[in-house]
Image (cartoon, rainbow, N blue to C red):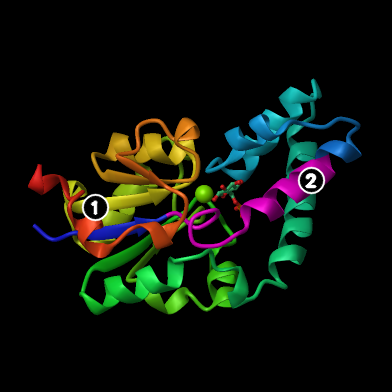
Amino acid sequence: QQTACIFDLDGVLVDTAVYHYKAWKQLANSLGFDFTHAQNEQLKGVSRMRSLDMILEWGGIRKSDAEREELASLKNSWYVAMISKMTAGEVLPGSLELLRQLKQQGIKIALGSASKNSALILERTGLAHFFDAIVDGNAVTTSKPDPEVFIKAAELLDTAAAGCVVFEDAFAGVQAANAAGMGVVGIGDAENLKGAQIVIKDLSEITVAEIEALNRFLK
Ligand code: BG6
Ligand code: MG
């Protein structure tokens, strides 16, 4: 059974996590409070509206639906201003080399991201052409840790879930990959990524052979 790779975007292929953090922090500060790095960790992989709701709860602030929509678009306008200036230099270490090798070996590649801004980011960083399928926040109705985003990606790649290996920097994403019955490589600190089969610092630390060994048909 063939192996396919499904990559999260923010914090795995590109260094956008820092922009999300800056924009959310600016929003919280404008409402008169702040949140910690540990709290920020919980926002990773989580949809825009769900992130806003978590932040408002941390600040003990209640807002109407109309105000929530406004705050979310305000945050997004700051975020988009930052990512509009991104360059290929913000692709994380090892990403390009690994994507090239996977392509060379005929392994299918999908994006599985919660972001509604994935098209802009892939275009700015020159990564778009690597993907056989793109599933992002515009294509799903439920957020990670629900497995919907990865299940859709596997369907588009015409690959069974057990043959898919997911790359994730968010705990919610690791949970989603496990719920989908896929292999999962964690990117970042092992303590934040319980449930991943291996955890690496960045994509320069893994080879195609090591990825193929995570194909669950081989277990
Ligand atoms: C995820 C990020 O990839 O996308 C989250 O980890 C973010 O931090 C989510 O909230 C939604 O992104 P966007 O670009 O649609 O606001
Ligand atoms: Mg991520």
Q: Amino acid at mark 2?
A: Glu
- The answer to whether residue 194 is above or below residue 17 is above
Discs 2, 1 touching: Cβ within 8 Å: no
Q: Dot 2, crowdedness within 10 Å: few (<14), some or many (≥20)?
A: few
The label nearer to you, 2 versus 1, is 1
Q: Is residue 163 left or right of residue 73?
A: left
Disc with the residue nearer the chain's start (2 vs 1): 2
Q: Where is residue 28 drawn, in percent x and y?
A: 82, 37
The Cα–Cα distance between marks 2 and 1, rounded to whole angstroms, is 38 Å
Q: Amino acid at mark 1?
A: Cys
In the displayed image of the protein, which residue is found farthest to the top?
60
Q: Nearer the viewer, residue 208 or 141?
A: 208
Q: Is residue 181 magenta?
A: no
Q: Where is residue 132 drawn, in percent x and y?
A: 32, 71
Q: Where is residue 91 drawn, in percent x and y?
A: 55, 68
Q: Where is residue 58 drawn, in percent x and y?
A: 74, 24
- Name the residue at 23% across, 55% down: 210
Q: Is residue 6 left or right of residue 9?
A: left
Q: Which residues are magenta?
A: 8-27
Question: Which label was assigned to residue 164?
Answer: 1
- Name the residue at 61% across, 74% down: 89
Q: Dot 1, crowdedness within 10 Å: few (<14), some or many (≥20)?
A: many
Residue topped by disc 2: 70
Write down the quadrant of residue 19 in the picture: bottom right
- The answer to whether residue 215 is above or below residue 131 is above
Question: Which label was assigned to residue 66?
Answer: none
- Name the residue at 8% across, 57% down: 1
